[in-house]
Amino acid sequence: MIELEEAIEIIKENVKKIKRVKTCNIIDAINKVSVEDVYSPIDSPPFDRSPYDGYTYNSDIDTNKLKVVGTVFAGEIFKKKLDKNEAVKIMTGAKIPKEANCVIKKEDVDIIDEYIILNKKLNKHDNYIFKGEDINKGQLIINKGCTISVEDIGVLASLGIHEILVYDDIKVGILITGTEIQDLHEILMDGKIYDSNKYILNSKLKKMDINNVVVDKASDDLLELEEKVRSIIKRVDCLITTGGVSVGDKDLIPKAFKELGAKELFWRVNVKPGGACYSAILEEKLLLGLSGNPHAALIVFDNILIPAIEYITNKEKNHKIKAIFKGEFNKKSKKDRFIRAKLFTENAKLYVKMTDNKDAKARLYATLNSNCMIKVNKGTTLTDNQMVEVVTF
Ligand SMILES: Nc1nc2c(c(=O)[nH]1)N[C@H]1C(S)=C(S)[C@@H](COP(=O)(O)OP(=O)(O)OC[C@H]3O[C@@H](n4cnc5c(N)ncnc54)[C@H](O)[C@@H]3O)O[C@H]1N2
Ligand code: MOO
């Protein structure tokens, strides 16, 4: 049986990254990935400007009394020629006239009629913002492959760039399988259960900013499964199924995919819970068959599907950190185990504790209030204050 890390590597070797691109208005570009390097088309600021409300003049003077010959507001230009011993009243952000070379703050002068008395001696370029001081024309702003942040969008806007070429959004299918699954609005019949996976997986995808999602469900019937998969796979880049990946008579996901001609990547991973999972490639798309057990499905979602989707969408990130474990965990296992936990800080140190000390199979309760998972390496237990590896999501 393969380990988790191998499962991720096998997927990366077999899936194709999204190549479709689109031009995107920067207002919608947050979290998208830039296809190209982006260079500044202009200097920013585009002209020499004042950082203060005050007076601008040429510092090469032998008096501290200057005549104020006009006012320049932000967005306007002082059109006249400014002579020696003359000043212009200037507002923050306004263009500094050609002949001036410094700005004195309003607070640092006294006003007598149409004159100002300078209470400070300024030198050339004191309180002076140069054209291109922030960003130069032709400067590299965004590296190709970078995930666009709020700050990137702010800089793009400041340079007048309103569109950017990005990779297209991933389309994901969710196929919920199981004859025992009922919709939430139905009255629960004996032996049946409500469908939590649909809501969990949809929300996980939404949280990842993935909104192109096709959701369907199928009963444990080989022909129905094949038909649903055949129909969904054409519309998505990646298909997630839940249920039907163990060894029961009705665990038909691997069989359905084989019948459809899929290439199997792996079936079962050496991890607890979530070991019952299946992966294949069909029509160049990734399939990940998660366990029906929601707790187990989430472990595989966070540890295999998220890295896989991040790879496909050119957004790889590190989700692993180290924290100090508080509590005790004595269950040794032959497999790596993930337990639901909560990260918290105390005295500027990062700690983690379990959210449910029972860690029982299929307990969705443990997921409540959790914001991470602790990895318990095979053959080990956890003791108070030891350093542990934590996966955040
Ligand atoms: N003989 C063996 N039996 C099982 C093994 C094994 O190794 N040998 N592995 C067990 C493990 S571990 C798991 S996990 C499950 C995985 O089973 P499947 O992936 O085939 O999933 P199902 O049997 O369809 O469902 C498991 C469980 O989850 C419930 N479920 C299913 N779908 C949903 C849903 N949408 N929302 C909420 N709950 C759902 C389902 O009713 C079952 O109770 O296999 C073990 N068996
Ligand atoms: O494989 Mo099951 O998914 O351990 O809980």
Image (cartoon, grey):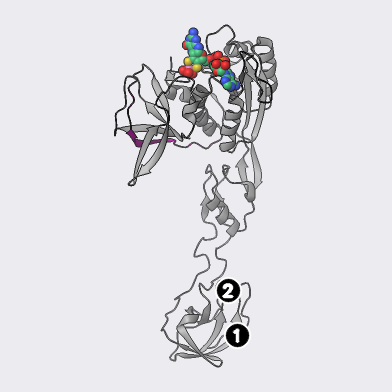
Kindly report the distance in space between the C-alpha atoms of the residues bearing marks 1 and 2.
13 Å
**Residue 283 seen in the current view:** no
Residue beneath label 1, please? 70
The residue located at (65%, 10%) in the rendering is 222
**Above or below, 26 relative to 271:** below
Q: Quadrant of residue 92?
A: bottom right
The residue located at (43%, 91%) in the rendering is 62
**Above or below, 230 relative to 309:** above
Residue 159, how many percent across, how many down? 59, 59
Residue beneath label 2, please? 94
Compare residues 89 and 300 and report the one nearer the observer: 300
**Above or below, 231 relative to 317:** above
Label 2 sits on what residue type? Ala
Residue 125, how many percent across, how many down? 45, 76
Left or right side of 331 for 37:
right
The residue located at (53%, 20%) in the rendering is 293
Compare residues 361 and 127 and report the one nearer the observer: 361
SS class, disc 1: strand
Residue range corresponding to the magenta coloring: 314-330
SS class, disc 2: loop
Residue 280, how many percent across, how many down? 56, 18
Left or right side of 353 for 265:
right
